Image: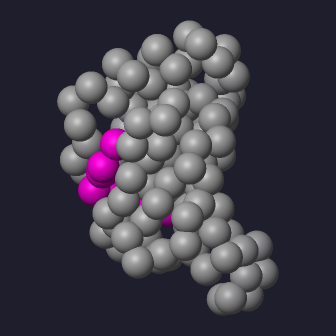
């Protein structure tokens, strides 16, 4: 049985700079994590460090890849989900402000 996400994600294309990797853009984001796409996705369990640019302000984060889907082959583009492990305390508030300015664009996916 499918259950809705505990924390809703919103479809915003935010730039993310990952330490030691090329910049990527989010497909969706919440106060607990994001989904992105890159040419060589990283495997689940991989720790990540980087910054998320939200309305011109960069927020440093530490996170962990929790899932990954490749489209074809090991060197092909794929999507991955990142759970934030550490994030500045004002990020959820700033994300809510950004959401009010941009519109909701709720992602209606289920786990």
- Percent across and percent down for residue 40 are 61, 80
Q: Nearer the viewer, residue 29 or 60?
A: 60
- Nearer to the camera, 20 or 37: 20
Taking the image as shown, residue 12 lies to the left or right of residue 72, namely left
Tell me which segment is drawn in magenta: 59-67
**Viewed as shown, does residue 44 lie left or right of 4?**
left
The residue drawn where x is 51% and y is 30% is 55
Task: Please state the horizontal and vertical placement of residue 99, each as a whole percent of the image.
Answer: 55, 18
| Quarter of the figure that contains the C terminus | top right
> Is 110 situated above or below 20?
above
Relative to 65, say whether 21 is above or below: below
**Residue at image location 31% in from the left, 69% down from the top:** 47
Residue 83 at least partly seen: no
Q: Quadrant of residue 90?
A: top left
Q: Reply above or below: 27 against 72.
A: above
In which quadrant will I find the N terminus?
Answer: top right
Task: Say if 61 sits above or below 2 in the image.
Answer: below
Q: Is residue 64 magenta?
A: yes
Q: How is the image coloured?
A: one colour
Q: Indicate yes or no whether the magenta region holds residue 97.
A: no
The rendered magenta stretch, by its main secondary structure, is classed as strand
């Amino acid at each position: 049985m499918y259950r809705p996400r505990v924390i809703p994600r919103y479809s915003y294309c935010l730039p993310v700079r990952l330490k030691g990797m090329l910049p990527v853009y989010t497909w969706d984001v919440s106060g607990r994590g994001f989904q992105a796409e890159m040419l060589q996705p990283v495997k689940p369990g991989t720790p990540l460090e980087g910054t998320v640019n939200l309305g011109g302000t960069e927020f440093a984060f530490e996170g962990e890849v929790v899932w990954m889907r490749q489209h074809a082959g090991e060197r092909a583009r794929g999507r991955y989900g990142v759970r934030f492990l550490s994030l500045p305390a004002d990020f959820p508030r700033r994300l809510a402000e950004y959401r009010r300015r941009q519109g909701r664009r709720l992602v209606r996916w289920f786990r």
